[in-house]
Image (tube, rainbow, N blue to C red):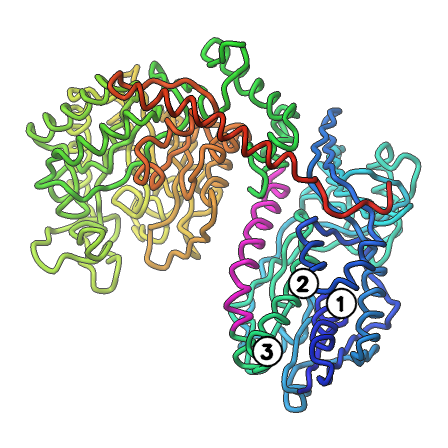
Amino acid sequence: MRIAVVGGGPAGLYFALLMKRDWPELTVDVFERNQPDDTFGFGVVFSDQTLDTFKIADAQSYAAIRDNFAYWDDIEIHFKGDTFRVPGNGFCGCSRRSLLMLVQARARELGVNLHFGSEIADAETLKRDYDLVVGADGINSRIRENWRERFQPQTDLRPNHFTWMGSTRPFDAFTFFFKETEHGVFIAHCYQYEAGRSTWVLETDPETFAKAGLGAMDEAQSAAFLEGVFAEELQGHRLITNRSLWRNFPMIRCRHWVVGNVVLIGDAKATAHFSIGSGTKLAMEDAIALHRAMGQAKLDVAAGLKLFETQRREEVEKTQHAADVSLVWFEELKRFWDFEPLRFAFGLMTRSKAITYDNLALRAPDMVEAVDKLVADGLGDLAKRRKDGAPVPPAFQPFKLREMRVENRMTLSPMCQYSAQDGLPDDWHLMHYGSRAIGGPGLIFTEMTCVAPDARITPGCTGLWNDAQEAAWKRIVDFVHAHSTAKICLQLGHAGRKGATRLMWEGMDRPLPEGAWPIVSASPLPYYPESQVPREMTRADMDRVKAEFVAAAGRGERAGFDMLELHCAHGYLLASFLSPLTNKRTDEYGGSVENRLRYPLEVFRALREAWPREKPMSVRISATDWAEGGLSAADSVAIAEAFATEGCDLVDVSTGQTARESRPIYGRMFQTPFSDRIRNEAEVATMCVGNITTADQVNTIIAAGRADLVALGRPHLADPSFVLRAAAWYGVDTDQPVQYGPGKDQLMRNTPREREELETLKLKAKPSRHAPVIEA
């Protein structure tokens, strides 16, 4: 079997040596365009976990790498004169040149044929002569680019500018510096990679880059300029250049990694932003995964490549998602610049979601205690404290909207139950809302409650357009108030073009086969090709629907609801006005975002006038359509600001479901960044939602200033006592009906002991299994 590897970087060399080691009879050729001692860049970063992976994959090369790395355990953050040091991170730095030399030597020793100064333009010249061709030729891969129609890459060129430089200044921690200048803010990501050598990745936003005139500077001039910016931080050391060109980071994803007997690995197939230090890690782990897949397939190339892509893709995409979130944090730095330094540092540490509140509490308990105090101090007399005066964790701090106080930050997300008859909530709804209220959330939201029979999504949707429905809702509200401390919010909505559809479990958003009612929308666009075509709303329709909303709000007030939410998300009627994908009107209600806002604001304004002044109101919006040509980030901020100006107290930030072409990028807390943007740019309180599953995540979100309330849906469906269990985990007292008192007492006794035992086990584990060889 003959294998050709294009690219002599860490990914290509590592795959070559692993294959030759385990199957010495193979012919393995590596083609590298540069010379063996050419090196660009300075150091690379590996975590403890990655080093363990290398140790298992090839003990000999691992030992060589281990003997040449500089180890550190801490992350240090310098911001506005404050310094924060967080231990327990377990990373090492290694010279890129040393790494390449070590892996080259190991490959030669095993009999890999290394061809330096060999330019391979495309795979066609190799695929006929080799059984397997591996494209490991980096970000600018010619293999990928010459076969674009086959690999189908997508490149997202990010706006921030960055350059890699070096220095002789030593470090004993991975260090972040944030410097404000007359031009704007500069960021330095710094780490030591060998004795007397450190990497400096310098980053700034496009406006600062332009104002500083960096685009017109050569390497030496850029280095001199940055030495001035970071003169204090360099401590008399100079910056070193090595092809230190300013660039924009390309986030690369490929629809296909494999075409025939050609496969892409490393940066050729997928990139991850340098802010999480995973580029070389991903590349070498790709090599390990491809080697493993070929072994599992007993060197059957087609089967092995299929296994590789199937088994490896999820892990790569998870890492890319973390990198995406991290890079956006740095791109949106202005959003956090006015944060208290402690909250800024906490947000930096938790930006990619790999580190959370609980995780940080094990690494840096003093920092988390200080964050708890910061959140509590911001609430003044409203804050909750333990008997010893220490504040409770952020998730359990109360929050006030107008005259309504909620006892904690966890809410029951609005979730349609599709179980009503003619809009009438019944015993199912009493059980659903009553049991969740008893479980402890500070606030519960009703499902989208429709303002008229023809406003329903499905025949199973609840409504509030007649006396019987009002009485049924009052029964539920009275139960919640009588047996819990939860507040309850009525969410009102109109389905618009997504109306007259089947129950969720019978075919979500698909049209009813019979019994459908006429539907309206901003424009006459069906949701699916087979869906009913809605009638474009006339001014008379708008007046009628607005009056139906106001009438339903009056019924909600008589039923005793504490709060009112207007549903303007998920492609329903009011959302269809907001999104340019669904609003094609040419009158004063279409076109600009200001025009698209006109009717939703009109409805909100009428509700705000009808709803008691002392009671809060919120609006649910889709902050993005997840589709080309849909709502922009600027649109979502403008929409939130407009509603806030009209008296909206809280923006319930969701995303998508606007159009069938939506392609969300899912992940843990995947919608939280949209809440973060609206909260900190529009300066309005927000509630976030979307794959948030633990109280730890809630603590992280609240403490980092990304939202004020956190809505949880499926966790509450699976466990009505979700909040009670979370309170027991953190040792926070919470109200429960007297009938359930013994259960609460047992939970409060046992859970802290279980948590203490778990944390003791974690703390007993060594911070690193790799002895530091080079001390900075």
Q: Is residue 684 part of the magenta span, yes or no?
A: no
Amino acid type shown at disc 3: Trp
Query: How far from the left and from the top, in percent, is residue 610?
Result: 22, 22
Which span of residues is magenta-colored? Answer: 307-333
Which residue appears farthest toward the bottom when viewing the image? Answer: 128
Residue 363 appears in which quarter of the rendering? top right
Identify the residue at horizontal 62%, vertical 21% (top origin). 370
Q: Which of the pair 550/301 is nearer the observer?
A: 301
Query: How far from the left and from the top, in percent, is residue 408?
Result: 40, 22
Closer to the camera: disc 1 or disc 3?
1
Q: Which mark is residue 9?
A: 1
Q: Are marks 3 and 2 in contact (CB under 8 Å)?
A: no
Q: Which of the pair 714/571 is nearer the observer?
A: 714
Q: Which mark is residue 283?
A: 2
Separation of residues labelled 3 and 2 (CA atoms): 20 Å
Q: Which residue is mark 3?
A: 147
Q: Disc 1 or 2, which lies upstream in sequence? A: 1
How packed mark 1 is, by other alpha carbons closer than 10 Å (few <14, some 14-19, many 20 or more), is many
Q: Disc 1 or 3, which lies upstream in sequence? A: 1
Separation of residues labelled 1 and 2 (CA atoms): 9 Å
Identify the residue at horizontal 81%, vertical 64% (top origin). 100
